[in-house]
Image: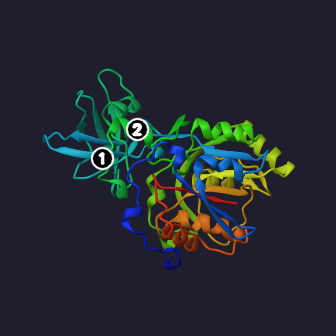
């Protein structure tokens, strides 16, 4: 674990999204030549080969943080684990203070969550709405965008945050964290990719709080992480397999897209049909699908660092992830969700 630790000056944690999005800096590491280049994200197409296929995660972040009222009149913070919902009558939530099965947690409209179950520190609720409002409607009316702890205190207003902590192509899904490597994409970037004949396909992986969780010995013993729901359209599967057979590079945008396609792969083809993944990728690991990775700079000692370093090792890179991160720190790159981007070739 300690080999994945590094020291980051607080000033390199960008608290708000840079504008325009594609003006974020780009750290390019070519594993074949062992060279590092700096640029801006808007120019990423020039480093990619024609006829490559790019895979992005089109999940949507929901405003999953709520402040509701207990029957006693006190306030309670409720965090809806939107990515884990399998049954609308049994919605998993986390709360910041005591509650019990049978209690009502009320919205300003008078609608409420009825607490219907508990498992350790997690509670389960169902929506009771006089007007027949859905959970998603109530979240959009009364919820706030969940932010990682290192972004707390940011001054961005909620209406701006709902757009900025969201990819420009977000479509479906129920994530509680953004696929941050995709936050830099703009119409300008997509136009430059199209001009170079680089294909675009989407997967959906609903990102959960587990993406920020500390690793435990059980993760290494079972080779599993938290479970996340995934969707892969038949057309995307076909496009990936055709590209692999033709020898065209596959570009994974972000650890979520990378985790999705690798969990569905065998013998360098997409073969499995799954609706969820709990795969834990760490060195050594033979990647089946992805040839190139676009990613942000991640928190120390997290599963995301293990994943990226596994990718570097599989590509026989001479530098490890901490060496690259220290180079980025020396050159004042910004880190984490709203930070700058890294391209690994």
Residue 162 shown left or right of residue 129 in the figure: right
Please tell me which residue is depicted at 76% across the width and 49% down the height of the picture: 271
Give the residue furthest to the right. Answer: 246
Q: Farthest bottom residue?
A: 2
Q: Is residue 132 found left or right of 201 in the rendered image? A: left
Residue 43 lies, in percent from the top left, at 63, 48
Cα separation between marks 2 and 1 = 13 Å
- Disc 2 is placed on an element classified as helix
Q: Nearer the viewer, mark 2 or mark 1?
A: 1
Chain-order first, disc 2 or disc 1: 1
The residue at the far top in this view is 131
Closer to the camera, 197 or 261?
197
Farthest left residue? 72
Residue situated in front as seen by the camera: 302 or 263: 302
Q: Is residue 217 above or below residue 101?
A: below
| Colour treatment of the image | rainbow
**Position above or below: 221 against 243:** below
Task: Return the residue at label 2.
Answer: 162
Q: Which residue in the structure is indicated by mark 1?
A: 155
The numbered dot on residue 254 is none
User: Camera-side residue: 312 or 268?
Assistant: 312
Image-quadrant location for residue 127: top left
Q: Is residue 342 left or right of residue 163?
A: right
């Amino acid at each position: 674990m300690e080999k994945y630790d590094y020291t980051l000056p607080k000033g390199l944690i960008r608290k708000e999204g840079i504008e325009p999005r594609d003006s974020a800096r780009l750290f390019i590491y070519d594993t074949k030549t062992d060279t590092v280049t700096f640029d801006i994200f808007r120019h990423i197409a020039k480093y990619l080969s024609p006829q490559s296929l790019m895979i992005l995660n089109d999940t949507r972040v929901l405003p999953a943080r709520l402040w509701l009222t207990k029957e006693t009149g006190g306030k309670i913070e409720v965090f809806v684990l939107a990515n884990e919902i399998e049954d609308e009558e049994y919605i998993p939530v986390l709360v910041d203070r005591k509650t019990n099965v049978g209690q009502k947690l009320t919205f300003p409209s008078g609608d409420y969550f009825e607490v219907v179950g508990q498992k350790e520190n997690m509670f389960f609720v169902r929506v009771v709405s006089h007007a027949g409002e859905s959970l998603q409607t109530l979240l959009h009316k009364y919820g706030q965008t969940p932010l990682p702890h290192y972004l707390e205190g940011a001054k961005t207003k909620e209406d701006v945050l709902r757009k900025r902590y969201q990819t420009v192509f977000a479509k479906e899904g129920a994530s509680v964290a953004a696929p941050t490597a995709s936050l830099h994409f703009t119409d300008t970037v997509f136009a430059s990719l199209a001009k170079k004949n680089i294909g675009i396909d989407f997967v959906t992986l609903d990102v959960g709080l587990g993406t920020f969780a500390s690793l435990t010995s059980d993760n290494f013993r079972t080779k599993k992480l938290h479970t996340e729901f995934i969707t892969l359209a038949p057309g995307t599967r076909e496009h990936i397999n055709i590209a692999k057979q033709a020898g065209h590079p596959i570009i994974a945008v972000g650890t979520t897209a990378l985790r999705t396609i690798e969990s569905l792969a065998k013998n360098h083809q997409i073969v499995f049909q799954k609706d969820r993944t709990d795969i834990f990728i760490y060195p050594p690991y033979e990647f089946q699908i992805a040839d190139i990775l676009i990613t942000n700079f991640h928190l120390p000692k997290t599963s995301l660092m293990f994943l990226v370093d596994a990718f570097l090792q599989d590509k026989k890179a001479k530098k490890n992830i901490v060496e690259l991160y220290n180079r980025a720190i020396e050159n004042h790159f910004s880190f984490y969700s709203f930070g700058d981007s890294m391209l690994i070739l």
